[in-house]
Structures are given as structure tokens and as C-alpha cells.
Amino acid sequence: MFALGLPGGSEWIIILIVALLIFGPRLPSVMRSVGKSITEFKKGLKDAGDDVDKAVEDADKSAMDDSEKERKG
């Protein structure tokens, strides 16, 4: 069967040649745009993760406050 994985050395060379043929002199600007897109995507993931962590902390704090109120009253 087929083994799916990362391309080896010769496959990367073929991929680069095809990219050069398709994009030509625009390749550096295309790669820069791809890099910026990846950076923005990672920032979005980090922000989403931070929001989830904050929501979990707030929920834990709220649950602890509720349990303390039940013990007192």
C-alpha cells in the first residue's frame, strides 16, 4: 500500500521546481504571505486557548465560591 508521510529529499526538489514554474518571480512574495497567514493562524489558536483557559479558571472560581457559600449558609 501507500505510505503517507513527509516527502523525502528528491520529492522536495520536485515540489520546489513545480512551485518555481507556477509562481516564478512572485514566489518570495507568495511564501511571505503564506508565512504571515501561518503566524496569524497560530496567534488565533493561542488567543482561543487563552480564552478557554480563562473560562475554565472563572468556572472553577465560581464553583469554589458557591461551595463556600453553601458551607456558611
Image (cartoon, helix red, strand yellow):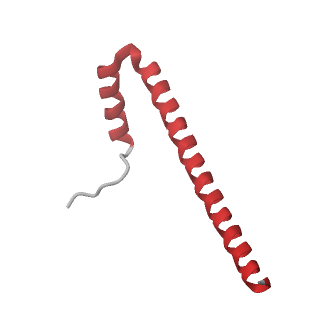
Q: Nearer the viewer, residue 24 or 61?
A: 61
Residue 6, x across and y down, in percent = 38, 49
Seen from this angle, which residue lies furthest top?
Answer: 25
Task: Locate residue 63: give its quadrant.
Answer: bottom right
Q: Quadrant of the C terminus?
A: bottom right
In the depicted structure, whether residue 65 falls above or below residue 48: below
Residue 12, x across and y down, in percent = 37, 38
Residue at screen point 28% across, 58% down: 3
Residue at screen point 50% across, 40% down: 41
Residue 19, x across and y down, in percent = 33, 26
Q: Nearer the viewer, residue 25 or 29?
A: 29
Q: Quadrant of the N terminus?
A: bottom left
Residue at screen point 67% across, 64% down: 57
Residue 47, x across and y down, in percent = 59, 46
Q: Is residue 33 left or right of residue 57?
A: left
Seen from this angle, which residue lies furthest right?
Answer: 72
Q: Nearer the viewer, residue 23 or 54?
A: 54
Q: Nearer the viewer, residue 22 or 15?
A: 22
In the depicted structure, whether residue 47 falls above or below residue 3: above
